[in-house]
Image (cartoon, helix red, strand yellow):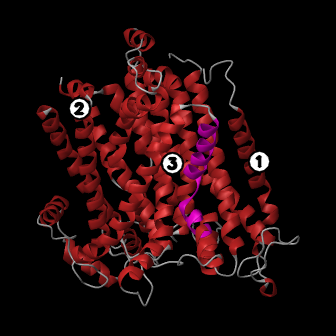
Amino acid sequence: MLLPRRARLPASARVALAVVVLLWLVAACSPLFTERSRSIRLDARLQPPSLEHPCGTDDLGRDLLARIVTATPISLAIGLVAAAVSLGVGFTVGAAAGYFGGAVDLALSRLIEVMLCFPVLFLLLALAAFLPPSPATVIAAIGLTSWAGDARFARAEILKMKELDYARAARAMGASTPRILLRHLLPNALPPLIVSAAFGVGWAILAEASLSFLGVGLPAPAVSWGGILSSSANWIEEAWWIALFPGLALFLTVSAYNLLAEGLRTVTTQGGRNA
Amino acid sequence: MTAYILRRLLWAVPTLFGIAVVVFLLLHMAPGSPGAGGADSLRRASAKAAEEMRRQYGLDRPLPEQFAAWIGRVARLDLGESFVDHRPVSERILEALPHTLALNGLALFFALALAIPLGVVAGGSPESVFDRASGAVLFAMYSMPTFWAALLLQTLFAVRLRWLPLYGTAADAAPAGLAGLQDRLAHLALPVTCLTYGTLAFVARLVRSGVAEARTADYVIAARARGASRGQALWRHALRNALLPVITLFGLLLPALLSGSVIIERIFAWPGLGRLYLDSILARDYPVILALSLLSAVVTLGATLLSDIAVAAVDPRVRDGAAG
């Protein structure tokens, strides 16, 4: 059971969900804007927002709105996949630590502690800069550096659940460890994990933008919100719109996912699982 | 209590070892090292850099030997020398450290000084207008990318209004005396603001939920029954418990601040550790990268130890539970 039956998302989270769906629709339509986003017009450099260019143009006269729209799918996709990787690693490590306990728990808990000690961006930058530049690298870098929080969380959940009656019953009936973990404990740990994942998507999108902003994100032909923002710093005296609009898109996306996560948390904790 | 501290210190030893291993792995993933894959010629370190790595880290030796030699040098505080300017890494770090301490110290101070009262007032009357409004603002802060906030603040206060400098730590011709101090503070204003608000939002939300939960707890109601005013009950009794998670997470605020520092120092051309780290990443200056990763993780470990011990000191449940 994913969510309590009569659970309803709070209004803010429903709005956020609508925004997320809308963003994915924009992403789906974005190929229509690719050509427009690439057409360089040096006679229309750094134009402020107008009817023709609702978000203005950049330093090469390219339509900023088209560029922002073109950057949507990669940003959303990286956010989703990187968050999934991070959750996968985090759940595996955390669940193993919580379920097996003893020496396994001690070792894995130290590993989680080690990861939490590093500034995430330090490791993220090192991975992104040292591995060959590609979307896969960005995903791997985010996924492999952000899992510690999820792991800590999963460990606590599994630790709590493994002594509950249904888990003991499954064990008593001779169910194998992977079966208990995947068939009995995972489904019950799912609601909090989904919340964690939704926050993870917001974080991953932000992380990708940060990497691109710092110049070690997606390689050249790909357009990224962080990349556009990075170039906007050069035109801060002339063109405020290059900083405003891509950041707005990023902010909207991240807050929509965070708001959705918060709504899901309210539902899963108030819906009285075993509270 | 002593038993708890000893136990906690003992646990830190394998963590410290793990930190060293992760940093050592970073070195082996670096282009130019034998462990690094990938045929991307642009990213491969030059032959000279590869030669230098072999010299400084003995990369042609067996792994355990390399690790032992490296740890041995680090333990003697020998962090090697920078590939870029061949100065000792420790010298470069000590140069940048005060700038980062000023920035992060102020950010941490303002974050806590604003977040705690905000959290107590909001949590003291949940669902009130103030709680809802501050909640919405804190949520927006929480989701706002620092680099975007920085660019917008620069546009508004430095470009449009011309109240504050765009970047740097001081004017080129820095005035002396009081005017000099004023100039430095003006340069600090924007970067400190940008570095503060994320931590502020995080801590305020933590304190708010703690106070909101504690205000209906028996001991707070009992305090009210004994004649404590509403303010006293919140500030003296509810806040104490609400601060526990803040103390617990205090150590982990440091790496978050340092992450933020990388971005903020780049935007505001601030010559601190974050800037040094980013420059070293872009220049493949491995000795600096390793030293900074190691130092930041070790400092964080120290800070988490201190916060764990602090929590145990104020909360008997923790020390008895853990020591028993």
Say which amino acid is labelled 3: Ala
How many discs mark residues in the rendered view?
3
Q: Which residue is mark 3?
A: B201
Q: Which residue is mark 1?
A: A22
Secondary-structure class at tag 1: helix
Pick the residue in front: B240 or B2: B240
Q: Earlier in the sequence, mark 2 or mark 1?
A: 1
**Predominant SS of the magenta segment:** helix
Crowding at mark 3 (Cα within 10 Å: few <14, some 14-19, many 20+): many
Q: Chain of mark 2?
A: A
Q: Which residue is mark 2?
A: A103
Which region of the structure is painted magenta? B129-152
Q: In this rendering, which labeled residue sits more in front, label 1 or label 3?
A: 3
| Residue B203 seen in render | no
Tell me where residue A110 sits by quadrant.
top left
| In magenta stretch: residue B151 | yes
Chain identifier of the residue bearing label 3 in the image: B
Q: Quadrant of the C terminus of chain B?
A: top left
Q: Position of residue B182 (x, y in %)?
A: 43, 76
Element type where label 2 sits in the image: helix
Q: Is residue B292 above or below residue B280?
A: above
Note whether residue B118 is visible.
Answer: yes
